[in-house]
Amino acid sequence: MKPTQSIVFLLSILTLGFSTITYGQVAKDSELFKALKTNDSLLFNVGFNTCDISQFETFIADDLEFYHDNSGVSNSKEAFMQSMKNGICSPNNTVTVRRTLVPESLTVFPLYDNGTLYGAIQTGEHTFDELAKDGNKSQGSLAKFTHLWIKENENWKIKRVLSYDHKAQLNTEETTVIIKDLNRYTGVYNSNKKQNVTIRLKADKLEIDIGKKQAILHAKSKTEFFIEEAPVTFEFVSNAEGSIEKFLVKENGKVVDEAIKQ
């Protein structure tokens, strides 16, 4: 490499290094951070938590791509809006799902094109809890998110969403109850997904066996149970005589499966 080429190469590396430092994570008191945190609040605290669809209309780009580690991909704003209307915001839901941003988890990284700010990457963690019509609250999932915000005519729009690492929140003793008669829940259930589910007693606890997967059921009440491995709940339904006849599997308040007891 010629001396002149070496100098150009060295200057390029130094420039790249300084650019990385200059355009790293922004401070939490910066205008960009505060603007996107406000947008996040409007999108979730207002839009998601109260099902104010107009917020999604405002902040979501038409060519949205939404990737969820449990429920697949939405390839457009229209598809995402429809899934919200039929899912979280369905009038048939018996519970309301509320999203809470984990304190201090939010980060923002600006994106520049030749010194001009054109977008930002926003990351964080949030929790989802279920609030029943009778006022009872149940813990749902804890997850990570990454949002790609792009400036369109000086307005911020979300173009890409990654929603991942969903797992059950850490449940405390206050969220569980002790049930003496666990035998009434045991047995073999036929799932709508064409598979048998076995619930058995194991060391004074209920174990659910779905194929090759097993988990311990923890009681929130006499009818509602949760597992620590996934953000789902199991609601047991009794017949007129008081015997268990089936259970419903719920995710974020929406019934995703039903299993009838043999």
Image (tube, helix red, strand yellow):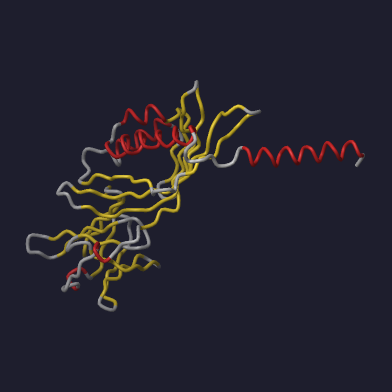
Residue found at the very far top of the displayed protein = 153
Return the residue nearer the eye: 81 or 151: 151
Q: Position of residue 244 (x, y in %)?
A: 16, 64
Q: Position of residue 89 (x, y in %)?
A: 27, 38
Q: Residue at x 18, y 52 (%)?
A: 136
**Residue pictured at 55% horizontal, 42% vertical:** 25
Left or right: 246 as drawn, with respect to 28: left
Q: Position of residue 111 (x, y in %)?
A: 58, 34
The one nearer the camera, 171 or 64, is 171
Q: Residue furthest bottom?
A: 203
Q: Quadrant of the N terminus?
A: top right
User: Residue visible at 49% across and 37% down?
Assistant: 160
Task: Kindly indicate the quadrant of the structure image that contains residue 230.
Answer: bottom left
Left or right, residue 212 beside residue 7: left
Placement of the C terminus among the 4 image quadrants: bottom left
Residue farthest to the left, as pictured: 241
- Viewer-nearest residue: 146 or 255: 146
Residue 32: % across, % down? 49, 33
